[in-house]
Amino acid sequence: MDLRKLPNLGALKAFEAASRLGSFSRAAEELFVTHSAVSHQIRSLETDLGMALFRREGKRVTLTESGRRYADQIRTALFDIAAATESMRAGDRDRRLVISLLPSFAARWITPRIGRFIERYPGIDVELQSTNTITNFNRDDVDVVLRFGDGDYPDLFVELLLDDAFFPVCAPTFNGGLLPKTPADLVRTTLLRSDHDMWRTWFKAAGLKNVTEPRRGVLYQDASQLIQAAIDAQGVALVRRSLAMHEIANRRLVRLFDIDAPSPWAYWFACPHALLETDRVRALREWLKEEATEFRRLYE
């Protein structure tokens, strides 16, 4: 057998996903590529094989008889490849802890603390995956996710890590050091914008019910960038307590007023039930609880 004549592995993966899901679009979502990329790869595979693998009827696709037989064989072969790869990785997988979390939480909360975990557990190799992409535990090589949301993550073990709140901050040098003295002063101040649209909620908590969200200026979709803009004295930012307390403690930011807007979201620890009692995940969970308790003492 001439292995040089094997089809492209990406085309085989696209074909396997499309045949299993019955849709090019769903295959594209699973593989994180475009619909046209999946369609192109499958057409290239059909050209290489000299036969049609799918019947195309408008937006619907169904496997031909040849496509069905090929899909069964390819799926078995890909599973064998995956199993062989996993067995090679298994030697150090038990000591590798993979955590998926938002970039802002990774930068502002985990990174300043993770050294203490590494010192306590030198035998565990930590891998932080900073991403906004939702983890699929059936596909992704991830042990734990730390997510900012409502805690509704079906079929997973889920535990509250940190609740949160919003409040305004600025650099101590903002406006030449002449900082706002009352919440009403913020109406005439440069307010930094984020995609959470929480300014209206905070103004209402401060007794200013008719003040709306700022609509001009840069819109920061990443909370860490928003905080950096405030540190750079570009304006007053409405920030999450979980992300800003480190900067406040180090006096890079000043909290304005003792008024919170409660957050409708919180940080959650989530993982598959099967991984909960592994040594690496149990160690992380216990350590996170300790760090969360210390963090609460910081702001309470």
Image: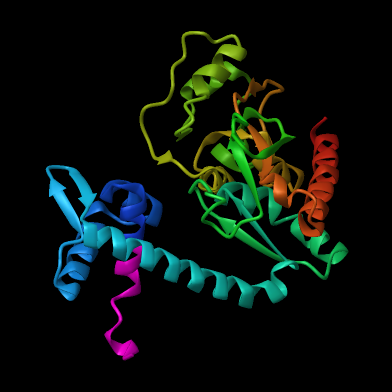
Say which of 33 and 128 sits in front. Answer: 33
Name the residue located 49 percent from the left edge and 45 percent from the top edge. 222
* Residue 5 within the magenta-colored segment of the rendering: yes
The C terminus, quarter of image: top right
Q: Is residue 37 at least partly visible in the picture?
A: no
Query: On the picture, is 21 further left or further right than 49?
Result: right
In the figure, is residue 209 to the left or right of 93?
A: left
Looking at the picture, does residue 241 appear above or below residue 25?
Answer: above
Is 188 on the left or on the right of 38, as rendered? Answer: right
Q: How many marks can you see?
A: 0
Q: Residue at x 81, y 51 (%)?
A: 282
* Towards the viewer: 221 or 266: 266
Instruction: Name which quarter of the figure residue 52 lies in.
Output: bottom left
Give the image location of residue 113, x and y in percent. Answer: 76, 55
68 or 149, which is in the foreground? 68
| Horizontal and vertical percent position of residue 246 | 72, 46
The picture places residue 3, in percent across and down from the top left corner, at: 34, 88
Residue 272 showing in the rendered view: yes
Q: Main secondary structure of the magenta part?
A: helix
Question: Measuring 48% from the left and 20% from the top, which residue is drawn there?
Answer: 187
Magenta residues (range):
1-14
Q: Is residue 231 left or right of residue 270?
A: left
Give the quadrant of residue 223.
top right
Determine which quarter of the picture holds residue 202: top right
